[in-house]
Image (cartoon, rainbow, N blue to C red):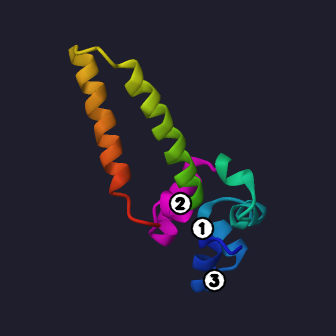
Amino acid sequence: MTTEIVLLRRKHALTQTELADLLGISQKAVSRLEDADSGNIRHLRLETAFALQVVFGKRPGQLFSRLFAEVEDAVMGRAVALDRTLDGRSDRATEHKRALLTDMVRRAANQPLL
């Protein structure tokens, strides 16, 4: 499967070595990023993710949409668990937590399809 990074790199006629130079990483690291079946993107350095955004103008969640969806699902599952622990509480801290959880659900629902 061709990844978004491969498509963008090819669109701009960049070699893996040229992209690696722009990102400040090795060509081998670019190859791992482009491997759709690789678990290596789970360990992507934040600096590299931001560098990809600078180069291609796309947020990491757009470049790695499947991983983003997996992470979002996991976080939202933990949010549901936190919400359950707040049942029966009405203090100020709980109100702030519930507002955050509500905002998380709103943002997830408004995510454009990647």
**Residue at coordinates 50% horizontally, 56% vertically from top-left?**
50
What label does residue 10 carry, if any?
3
- Numbered disc in front, either 2 or 3: 3
Where 55 sits versus 38, above or below? below
Mark on residue 51? 2
Residue 83 occupies quadrant: top left
* Of 78 and 28, the residue lying toward us: 78
Q: Label 1: which residue?
A: 22
For marks 2 and 3 on the same chain, the one whose residue lies earlier in the sequence: 3
| Helix, strand or loop at mark 3 | helix
Residue 77 in the image: x percent, y percent?
49, 37
Quarter of the figure that contains the N terminus = bottom right
User: Image check: 61 left or right of 7?
Assistant: left
Work out whether 94 lies above or below 100.
above
Q: Amino acid at mark 2?
A: Ala
Which numbered disc flags the more N-terminal residue, 2 or 1? 1
Indicate yes or no whether the magenta region holds residue 13: no
Count neighbours of disc 1 (C-alpha within 10 A) and say few if under 14, some if 14 to 19, many if 20 or more: some
Q: Position of residue 74 (x, y in %)?
A: 54, 41
* Pair 2/1: label in front: 2
Disc 2 crowd, CA 10 A, few/some/many (<14, 14-19, 20+): some
Of tags 3 and 1, which is closer to the observer? 3
Q: Nearer the viewer, residue 15 or 37?
A: 37
Segment tinted magenta in the rendering: 44-64
- Tell me the kind of residue under disc 1: Leu
